[in-house]
Image (spheres, rainbow, N blue to C red):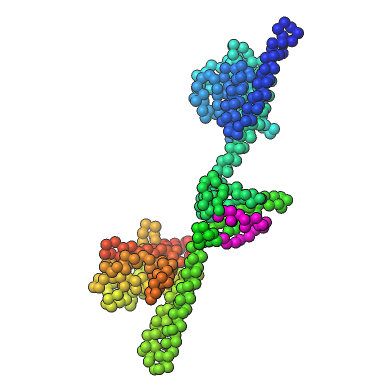
Amino acid sequence: MTDPSSPGGNRPDKRMQTRMLGLMDACTLINSSLELDDVLESILGLAVAITEATASSIFLRDKETGDLMFQAQVGGGNPEALKELKVPLEGSIAGWVATHGEPVRLDDATQDDRFFARADALSQFQTRSMLAVPLKTRQDVVGVVQVLNKRGDRAFDSDDELLLTAMANEAGAAIETRRAYERLSHEKATIETIVDRIPDGILVTDRDGRPRTLNAAAREIFGIATGEFSSESLEVFLRGLKDVNSEASQELVLLKPQGRVFSCRISPVRTEDGEVQSIVTAIRDVTSARKWQRRRDEFFAVGVHALVYPMERAMKLVQSGDSDAAASTLVQLSEVVTELVRFSEMESGPIRLLRREEPLVDILRGATEGGLPRGAGGKQGEIDWHAPGPELLAYVDVSQIQQALSLLLDSAAFLLDDRCALEIRSGANEERQIVTTLSGTSHRPEAREAATWLDAQARVEHFLENPGATSELGPAFARHIIESHGGSLQYSHSGDRFCFEMVLPPCPDSGEGSS
């Protein structure tokens, strides 16, 4: 530094004091934003100001690869041309500084063997003097900041190096903090996106019961707009959480909207000391499930009640010697029992299957050997059967699939117009699935609504809402059998044509084993 006792010697000191004050302001400005781009822009502008440089650029090391990448530049040339430029760690001044963690000050950088001329060529800038210093954290060098071409065609001096190094030390920590903030922000956004896609409601409250996070499903449940954290129904719910300090499950009935039932799983999040830090509550709308449970119980109750009268009547008829009437009543009793058994099996989950390989033609032949049942008009129709070859094998529980086919034949016969044939086609599709269709002509109004026959809940609702109706669970039970095999059953109707389509999984190859 210039001796202050010399004539005019206090001027450099005053200039240095001004630059030091600028450095203090720089440190404050660098730490004033959480956005990395804003921090980098501040670093570059301040580096130019405190060193009286013409231009400044900054390079950061990639956390994954360790490569030194150009980030930004102010002053001189065309910085857009340097975007995504990878600066070699060997063969560049910035690379040397990043590797060794020491500053480099040059009066003419182009004469140095380490000078990376490609950057000048791309940006159309002519570098002369250069000062490059490392951006350090406590653990590592995270990048390099360099200033170029001191104004007045002067060389950078030790004061410039001191000031830029001091600023770089502050900037390195700031950059690492912002990088961590960006990573956390990205991870937080990713987690929020995932949580928002969860169909169950997720509510996070702090230790005092104040809501902190609600996903989209929770906002819908409590009627809360995005950005808000309060509603009447949420306040009611939160009052019930105040005394919860351990895992719990409970059901919540909200009066608004009326009749909605939610199953809640409450999980406190604890610190290492065991104190409750926050509470995470998973909320599932079980309104439909609870409604179905009530309707199911009603169905069983009505079904059991329906057994009592035929049973008493059959006993009286037997005692009176009217065997024909007793037999008819027992048939009615058997139908009720069959419907209850089918419904019970559907509610119990997939059927236990005893599978084996069997030619499909033999399965179909067994299901149709009695011909087509009599239709709604009392006449028995014909079957136009295109038999598959013996090489088409199905891996199924034969008796169960034949039962499903028989139930579908009953439904098809009911729909079929008199003097029309039921067409049965079978074959393998491109996925090697086995497809069997039962189609025919029908002008009956039921043909347009027969898709509901495959829905057990729809049949139960129809039965309970229409006194005197029958449940007719046969088609739904056929679907249950087929789906237990991993297949599907669909119904379609177009014009005067209807079609039941049964799809079964491919028969496993001999080397794959059975499932």
Residue 205 is at least partly visible in this image: yes
Q: Position of residue 37 (x, y in %)?
A: 56, 30
Q: Is 264 inside the magenta-drawn segment?
A: no
Identity of the residue furthest to the front in this view: 232
Which quadrant of the structure image shows residue 265?
bottom right
Identify the residue shown where x is 38% and y is 91%: 323
Magenta stretch? 233-252
Of 225 and 46, which appears nearest the observer?
A: 225
Identity of the residue furthest to the top in this view: 7
Q: Give the side of residue 64 with respect to residue 434, left or right.
A: right
Identify the residue shown where x is 64% and y is 30%: 31
Q: Give the side of residue 86 with respect to residue 5, left or right.
A: left
Q: Position of residue 164 (x, y in %)?
A: 65, 22
Identify the residue shown where x is 29% and y is 75%: 376
Q: Position of residue 355 (x, y in %)?
A: 46, 69
175 over 165 or under it: above or below: below
Identify the residue shown where x is 61% and y is 25%: 43
221 over 417 or under it: above or below: above
431 over 180 or under it: above or below: below
Which quadrant of the structure image shows residue 431?
bottom left
Q: Quadrant of the N terminus?
A: top right
